[in-house]
Amino acid sequence: MSIKKLLIANRGEIAVRIIRAARELGIPTVQVYSKADAESLAVRLADESVEIGPAQASKSYLKQEAILDAARSTGADAIHPGYGFLAENAEFAAAVESAGLIFVGPTAHSIRLMGDKVAARAEAAAAGVPTVPGSNGRLDGVDAAFALVEQTGFPVMIKAAAGGGGRGIRIARSADEFARLMPQAQAEAQAAFGDGGLYVEKLIEGARHIEVQVLGDGHDVIHCFERECSLQRRRQKVWEEAPSPSLTPAVREKLCASAVALAKAVHYRGAGTLEYLYDDRSGDFYFLEMNTRIQVEHPVTEMVTGIDLVREMIRIACGERLRIRQEDVRLSGHAIEVRINAEDPAKGFAPNPGTVTALGSPGGNGVRFDSMLYPGYTIPPFYDSLLGKLIVHDEDRPSAIRRLARALGELTIDGVLTTKPLHQALARDADVQAARFHTAWLEPWLDTNAARLSPVSAPPATGGQ
């Protein structure tokens, strides 16, 4: 089995990333796009492009039948969903395969199983992977919920069973808060995911967020080591690095082995990520969830292992067995990725779409800039504000931070405000340099340092480029 033409059911920097990987494999590409993305870099780079609807994602990138029609009309025999939108939608994966097409990702069964956070916890427990103390299943009414938190104690996290991206989560530190927040979490989960199911976990305060990258072919699974993703704002990652500076070799070995065990248990196919909380005071780690897709932060893993994860996803979707053995995966140096968003960090990260009047990409050894930008491009206001990712690699963490600071200094995106000043300030921070942080570290830091984060941007150009 081989892919003759690949359709990308996404947009932005990940669409560009997939097009480039496919081209290196000799596979022609089809880019679907909304009216707002007609001038996007992905449309310019793809071999073919098909408009699928208006700007609203609900009428374009989330319209399954429009995407399938685009595949049929262009003769595409495979679809890569990227991340976000339909990437973890089991019904879409099933519809792609029912249409006789190849879904570049896991099976619909794996997506459905691991997408339900309660079912995923049960699978983890069955595979011997530690989970955070909490409910073994969905909460069955208020009385059952209160009985559970009496056992776990406060504080607890109320979480959406079908959740993701930090939505549907509430932290309760008392019985009164718990009673007040449960209905809020349920309503948000229902609105965001069409599923109001909840579960409860003990809140592990001061923990780190560690994730393990895996590759599977439905039979065998390997890990590509871990990433540290603890620098978060509103549970959204801001800065990611590999390997984690907080793990000992012994913990790393146990953590990665647990990820492989769980991925094997569900016969995982493609690239996936298992997320954990890690308490570096005790050395304990706890499984949180599995992301059944490529991650935004996958480049740091590529930089430290030399493995092109997107190309491997495509090869696996073609029916190839894993070409890489576990003993061949080696860590080399240290990599850091920072997300460059069209936001003003000095004003509560207010979105700042507009026209890019000039673009200067950093270069040099160990520097990579994955983006959707070109001079003259107008950033549409309808989607996520991520413009690109600046990734650096060097021989060790201190060197990587210095290289990051140098590369950020070279990066220029004129015409819009971006989060570049945030990353420059973080790279200078003593706690960040010493890796003294956890998942709740960044937001208080932002409260203290917001005034230092005013972006500088050239005024919009008055003439054409």
Image (tube, rainbow, N blue to C red):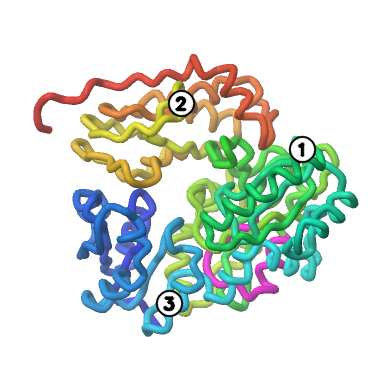
- Callout 1–callout 3 Cβ contact below 8 Å: no
Read off the magenta span: 257-274
As drawn, is 7 to the left or to the right of 431? left
Q: Is mark 2 on a helix, strand or loop?
A: helix
Residue at the image position 10 percent from the left and 32 percent from the top: 464
Residue holding disc 1: 205
Q: Residue at the spot x=42%, y=84% of the render? A: 98
Mark 1 packing: few (<14 Cα in 10 Å), some, or many (20+)?
A: few
Q: Can residue 47 be seen in this view?
A: no
Quadrant of the image for the C terminus? Answer: top left
- Say if the magenta span includes residue 270: yes
Give the quarter of the image for residue 121.
bottom right
Where does residue 380 sit, x and y in percent of width and height? 28, 43
Circle nearer the N terminus (1, 2): 1
Q: What residue type is labelled 2?
A: Pro
Residue type at tag 1? Glu
In the figure, residue 58 lies in which quadrant? bottom left
